[in-house]
Each structure stands twice: as structure tokens, then as C-alpha cells.
Image: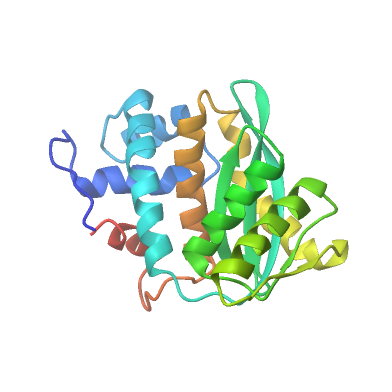
Amino acid sequence: MTIKFKGSHYPKPVILYAVFFYVRSAVSYRDLEEIMVERGGEVDHATLHRWVVKYAPLIAATAQARKRPTAVSWRMDETYIKVKGKWTYYYRAVDKTGKTLDFMLSERRDKAAARRYFKRAIGTNGVPDRVVIDKSGANLAGLQCVNVILKFTNSGNTIKILQVKYLNNIMEQDHRFIKRITRPMLGFKALHSADATLAGIETAHMIRKGQLDAIGLTAFQQFGALAA
């Protein structure tokens, strides 16, 4: 799907540069506003915010559709993101090689949220053979619910569940990149803007990991190609 930039007062490359720089670098909107001025473009921080919220999730959706196949052994965990001054739960998973699978922001950490996350991740990546989770009872219950559905709708295939802490070290390491980028943002004002921004950050992280078939292109060129 081609992303539409019609009606914008700025050229498409300028918008893409601003969005990419924000989701890839540890900067605030005020910092980015100054950077854009130095690059010859005066864009206020409110406009930069609108660009990220509008375009980042669209680019992320394209990245999910175009990324390389992932392994069938998953590592899943959640971390914390501050929204409106309160901590929310950010569900994430990578495969055994560290490739990003899917992500979801939730106001709650419970069985329903975990089930919703696993169904989303499976819809994007297919059914895994096994999933490593932490000792969370909510994550276990959510995954067991998914297994019940799979048992009766997918020829009896179910997911092997492992609760082994050291196997999830790769997930803990992967959280660090996201935290490094979000820290200067000083929290989000709304759930929808947090969700959109995180989608952009995850896309930049996927590009960094080489999850897109884009030989010879720079990271920014790969990001821009997702909007073509």
C-alpha cells in the first residue's frame, strides 16, 4: 500500500527524514525542531509530532508485511512505558535469533491483554512451535487460551510453553534499545501517540537488525522505501 502525502505543506523526503530521525535517535521534539532548522527546514515541534503519529504506524504496518520470515521459537516479555504520567505495559516478542516479531501497548497487564497480544503476533508471524515467557501467570493464562483455540481450529497443533528465565535474556537485551530511544521523550501524553511512536521505533529497530530485504540501501533509504 502506497502511503499518501498529498496535502502536506512539506515535501515527502522532509517528512520521512524527520519521522525517521525521531524514531531512530534519542531526541525530543524540541531537539528535532532545532535539527530541522539546521538542515534548512523550519518545522515546529507540534507539526513534527503530528507527522510521527500519522505516518509511523503506516510505515510500521508495511514493514511487518515485508519483513523476512522469522523463526518458530519465540521469546516474549513485557516492559513499561509511561503514558500520561502512569506506567503502561508494552508487550514485545523476538524469535530465538533476536528478530522482532510484534509489539502491543496495553493499559493493563492481565490474561485478556496477553491473549490479545499472542493472537496479534500469531496473525502477523504464524503459529510458533514454542514460546518462552517469564513467570507471569497472566502471560501463561493468555497463551493457554490461545492453545485452546488452536487445538480446535488448527488440526490440534498447540504451542509448547516454557517458563525459563535465562532463555529470555535476549528479550531483556532487546528492550534496552527501545528504552534508550524513549527515555529522552520524557513520557507520552496519550496512548494513541505512544502506540504510533513505538511502532516507528520498532520499525527502525527492525531495519537495524536487517529484517528487510534491502541490500545496498542505507537505513534511511530502507525506511523511505516502506512509504513508496
Residue 99 vs 45, above or below: the answer is below
| Location of residue 147 in the rendering, given as x and y in whole percent from the top left corner | 67, 63
Instruction: Answer yes or no: is residue 219 visible.
Output: no
- Image-based side of 32 in relation to 147, left or right: left
- Image-based side of 43 in relation to 157, left or right: left
Near-viewer residue (104 or 143): 143
Instruction: Answer yes or no: is residue 222 visible.
Output: yes
Residue 76 vs 20, above or below: the answer is below
Q: Residue at x 46, y 32 (%)?
A: 192
The quadrant of the rendering that contains the N terminus is bottom left
Residue 179 quadrant: top right
Residue 130 quadrant: bottom right
Q: How is the image coloured?
A: rainbow
| Location of residue 184 in the rendering, given as x and y in whole percent from the top left corner | 59, 34
The quadrant of the rendering that contains the C terminus is bottom left
Residue 194 vs 221, above or below: the answer is above
| Location of residue 191 in the rendering, given as x and y in whole percent from the top left corner | 52, 30
